[in-house]
Structure formats: C-alpha cells, structure tokens
Amino acid sequence: DVVLETEEGRLSMRYDEKYLYFLAEWKAFDPETDILYLPLDITPKTGSTYCENYDLTFERASDFVICIQGTRDSRVLVQERYERLWAMHAYETDREDAYYELREKDAPLFRPIRLMVQRSEPWPLGQWSPAVTYETGILRYGTADPEAAGYDSLTDYCFTEEGVELRIPWQLLNFADPSEMLIHDDYYQCYGVEYLQIQEMYVGLASGEDTEERIRMAPFALEGWGGNEIYHERLKESYYILQAAWTALGE
C-alpha cells in the first residue's frame, strides 16, 4: 500500500503479526553508492525533528531513523529519550542512574539500539564491569525466500532494481503488544515501562543526496488484530532429513 510518493521516490508499507514491511523505491537508485533514510514517528510524547547523526531534518518529531547503506552498514537508530536499554539498564551498562538527569524530549542525538545479553561478570567486592550488550539495530542483508539457494531466515532487507525491501520486527520499534497497537510510553514520565495505544505512525523517505530539505512524512494507519492471529507452518529442511533417517531405521 503506497504511503508516500514524491517526484523522486515512493514508499509502500504493510504489516502482519511478525513484521512491519517497507518497500522504498528511488529513481536511479544505486545500492553501492546511494543511501536511503526512513524516519519513523511512533510515539506522540517525544521525538526530534533533527537527527544530528546524519544531519537530517524531518516534518515531524521522529523516534527512529532507518539508514540503508550498502549490505553491511545498514541499521536502525533510536532517539535517545526513547532508548529502552538506557532507561531500564543504565546502571548495568554504564553505572549511571538514567533518572538522575533526564534526557530531553527533543534531543537530536539518535543512538544505536542495543540489547543486554548478559549482566556484568562476577568481580571481587568493590569492583564493577559493564554488562554485555549487542547491537540489535544492525540490519542483516540477504534473501528471505525459503525457495532461494541463499535463504537466510534472519534477513532484514534486500535490494530491488529500484530500491529496497525491508522488514522490521515490532519490538525493535518499542511496540509492547502490536495486536492492540500498544507501544512503550515515555519512560521518564512513567518511571518505567507503561503502555500507550496508538492508531497511526508517520513515515518518511529521502536519499543521501536529498537531505538538505526537511524530509516529508505521511501517516500510516495501524489497527490491531486482537486475538485473531493468522499463521501457517513451514517445515524446515531438517524435518525431511530426520524423516528419511527414521524411515530407514524402520525398514
């Protein structure tokens, strides 16, 4: 479904129980040299109209920026006020109190999205080591077609002749319950994780050569599905390997 269309490009979106899907098309797009930016305005509580990391300005206060740059340097960044890891685990990662000096609601710095995978290592009394984190916002290039020879189930994006297709898991964008379109509320206003229901998000699209102007953004309607999930099963290749092995044993 086309969400945004300009003279230079077009952005289409859909979603299901697993992902938000994007199709970003840009005229004369060269994946080896061109960069695409997709700002996302998720929460009405916070966000910035300027991203100092990439020197971008937006029509609306955005919470995330998706940067598509080649096959190795693409990632999702989060506006620092909406960074979940800092709000929840600042002491474990940096030995600081996230609520001592609150981050500004419109802070222009966007940070990498990280996940804490292990708390600090055991140390003698009085010593401290930071928790181990992993940048989950890094996007993985490949093909998500199960029939393709290079199939990779962890793929996040792939290039097309005129742009890029990508899929972003809900939780990466601070959705707590997408079936009801519940997102994380402002951590510092709620002093922790509380939920906020939304009915739409705003998205934009620009290339690296078109970032001097304010990036236009358009609404994308969101409607939950409650308990009516739709799914299908797909057997892995290992199933048929085990089937053949067990069949041979019974003969």
Image: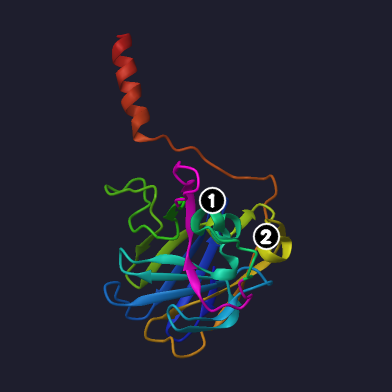
Furthest-bottom residue in view?
A: 213
Q: Is residue 170 visible?
A: no
Which quadrant of the figure contains the C terminus?
top left
- Is 18 rendered above or below residue 232? below
Q: Residue at x 55, y 43 (%)?
A: 231
- Can you tell which quarter of the image residue 206 is in? bottom left
**In the image shown, does 161 or 88 lie closer to the viewer?**
88
User: Is residue 205 shown left or right of residue 17?
Assistant: left
Residue 154 located within the stretch drawn in magenta: no
Structure colour scheme: rainbow
User: Residue 223: which numbered mark, if any?
Assistant: 2
- Can you tell which quarter of the image residue 237 is in? top left
x and y percentages locating residue 88 in the rendered image: 60, 56
Tag 1 residue: 18
Give the magenta part as a residue range.
103-129
x and y percentages locating residue 214 in the rendered image: 52, 88
Dominant SS in magenta: loop
- Is 107 rendered above or below residue 241? below
User: Which type of secondary structure does the marked residue at label 1 adopt?
Assistant: loop
Q: Residue at x 56, y 54 (%)?
A: 16
Disc 2: CA contacts within 10 A as few (<14), some (14-19) or many (>=20): few
User: Which type of secondary structure does the marked residue at label 2 adopt?
Assistant: loop
